[in-house]
Image (spheres, rainbow, N blue to C red):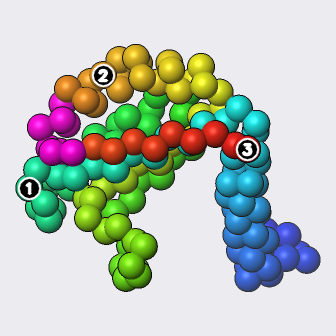
């Protein structure tokens, strides 16, 4: 029944979770440090602000968009419950994507998956703001 005599179930779970944590941390640390890496951050304001159904449709569209092969990692978010003068919480959904090179980001722009996303989801938003940045 026991996996290994020297490992209790608790130790096995601890070391398994530790490995997952290190893997996730390595992705976050290693990817952005590549000198030509591009971070593409998009903010969407929904036509029907606060409409949960539209928000979920946009999030589902972004999950499908994440299949573009040049995307290294991504994050889909909604405004956090932080209240400071410098925090803008007026958007409905955010999309943050990491690319290894400018060429990978250019490929993404014309990829059929991206074009389909714009075609099928643009009716949901009234405004989009994009911030692209590179490492210094």
How many labels sit on residues? Answer: 3
110 in magenta: no
> Residue 136: which disc?
3
Secondary element at tag 1:
loop
Residue at the location (30% across, 22% down)?
A: 115
On the image, the x and y values in percent for residue 60 come to: 28, 46
Q: Quadrant of residue 24?
A: bottom right
In x, y percent, where is residue 86? Answer: 42, 73
| Nearer to me, 24 or 86 | 86
Task: Tell me if 57 is positioned left or right of 86 in this view.
Answer: left
Mark 2 residue crowding within 10 angstroms, few (<14) / some (14–19) / many (20+): few
Q: Residue at x 46, y 44 (%)?
A: 131
Which mark is in front, 2 or 3? Answer: 3
Where the C terminus falls, by quadrant? top right
Q: Nearer the viewer, residue 134 or 23?
A: 134
Q: Earlier in the sequence, mark 2 or mark 1?
A: 1
What is the quadrant of residue 92 in the picture? bottom left
Q: Which mark is residue 61?
A: none
Return the residue found at the far right: 6
* Residue extent of the magenta highlight: 120-127
- Dot 2 and dot 1 residues touching (CB under 8 Å): no
- In the rendered image, is residue 99 in sight? yes
Q: At which x and y percent is residue 31?
A: 70, 44
**Earlier along the polypeptide chain: callout 3 or callout 1?**
1
Quarter the N terminus occupies? bottom right
Q: Taking 93 as reference, is 16 above or below it?
A: below
Q: Residue at x 85, y 70 (%)?
A: 4
Q: Mark 2 or mark 3, which has the lower sequence index?
A: 2
Q: Is residue 102 left or right of residue 68?
A: right
Q: Could you say which disc has been placed on residue 48 in the image?
A: 1
Disc 2 target residue: 115
């Amino acid at each position: 029944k026991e996996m290994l005599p020297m490992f209790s179930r608790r130790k096995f779970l601890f070391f398994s979770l530790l490995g997952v944590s290190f893997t996730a941390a390595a992705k976050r640390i290693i990817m952005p440090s590549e000198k030509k890496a591009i971070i593409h951050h998009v903010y969407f304001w929904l036509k029907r602000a606060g409409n949960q159904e539209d928000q979920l449709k946009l999030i589902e569209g972004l999950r499908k968009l994440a299949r573009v092969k040049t995307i290294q990692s991504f994050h889909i978010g909604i405004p956090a419950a932080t209240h400071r003068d410098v925090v803008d919480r007026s958007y409905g959904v955010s999309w943050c994507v990491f690319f290894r090179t400018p060429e990978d980001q250019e490929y993404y722009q014309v990829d059929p998956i991206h074009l389909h996303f714009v075609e099928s989801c643009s009716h949901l938003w009234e405004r989009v703001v994009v911030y692209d940045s590179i490492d210094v």
